[in-house]
Image (tube, grey):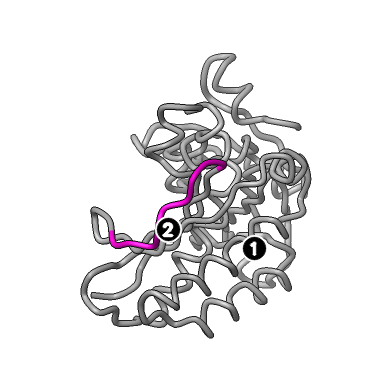
Amino acid sequence: MNLNYISLSLDYNTYIVTDNELRYDFQKHVDFINDYFSKRIRKYKFKTDGTFNMIDVALSEYDLQSSAIVPSKVLRVNLAFDKLRYEKAKTSEDCSYYLDLLEQGFKKAWKFKPIPLENLLNLIDEFKKENCLNKWIHKKKKFKGDDLELILTCEITTYSFQLWLTGKKISTQEEMINGIIMRTETGSSIYEGMFKNIIIDENIVITDKSDSPRIIVDKQALFNKELLFEINGDSEIKKILTYGL
């Protein structure tokens, strides 16, 4: 069994009862960190002792439980939750509070079970060097008939999620456009399923998970190095997908 998941969270059993709104709010603001560390730890293919495939650093303002293996296959370590520090952290791009917690949690987990502590601490350093930006290419497609390569790039921070569209000429690699076409509050449950594929017809279409058109990009404007686009959906969807723009 490999170590495949890293999670930083408020203790579920406690906060689902005492303050579920706070639990959900915290989860939104750390999703980008959990996603980053989970993806990168998988590359090491670290074999656990067979009892866990996730490390969960669970926070609480109340009595802390001992480290334990809990359902389903989770190595859980418990740390104190500093609510005041969290309130400051969630309104900025500073993720030092979250990374401090992960470092403490990893060291505590290492005392309980064999884990790749050095690799995990190195990932913290790498994330700091990347300015706490979780960034990856979602889709890259070439449309030879239009001499066009289109790239969808995702960026998540503790504050927001952004979807960038980059367009380049295949023949010369000249960049035609590079801009944000979707922006939401942070938290995977908000943007999940809102984008999937790129197709070209009369215009450039970004589809959602149901393969329906979600964003229509003016193809002619792109070749004039302008990014003009329209979001398909009602007023509420448009508001969600243009957060802070």
Q: Quadrant of the C terminus?
A: top right
Q: Would residue 104 appear left or right of 209 to someone viewing this image?
A: right
Residue type at mark 1? Leu
- The residue indicated by pointer 2 is 56
Occupied quadrant, residue 92: top right
Residue at (61% x, 60% y) in the render: 101
Stretch of the chain drawn in magenta: 61-69
Residue at the far front in the pictured view = 63
**Residue nearer the viewer, 120 or 68:** 68
Residue 75 on the magenta span: no
**Residue nearer the viewer, 82 or 122:** 82
The spot of residue 68 in percent (x, y) is 33, 62
Q: What secondary structure is found at the residue carrying circle 2?
A: strand
Residues under labels 2 and 1: Cα distance? 14 Å
Q: Would residue 196 appear left or right of 223 to someone viewing this image?
A: left
Residue at (53% x, 24% y) in the render: 232
Residue 68 on the magenta span: yes
Decide which of tag 2 and tag 1 comes sooner along the chain.
2
* Residue 157 can be seen, yes or no: yes
Residue at (41% x, 31% y) in the render: 16
The spot of residue 100 in percent (x, y) is 66, 63
- The residue indicated by pointer 1 is 99
Residue type at mark 2? Asp
Q: What secondary structure is found at the residue carrying circle 1?
A: helix
Around disc 1, counting alpha carbons within 10 Å, would you say few (fewer than 14), some (14 to 19), or many (20 or more)?
A: some
Occupied quadrant, residue 204: top right
Up the image or down, 168 lies above or below 41; here it is: above
Residue at (58% x, 67% y) in the render: 104
The spot of residue 76 in percent (x, y) is 38, 59
Disc on res. 70: none
* Residue 143 can be seen, yes or no: no
| Residues under numbered marks 2 and 1 in contact, where contact means CB atoms less than 8 Å apart | no
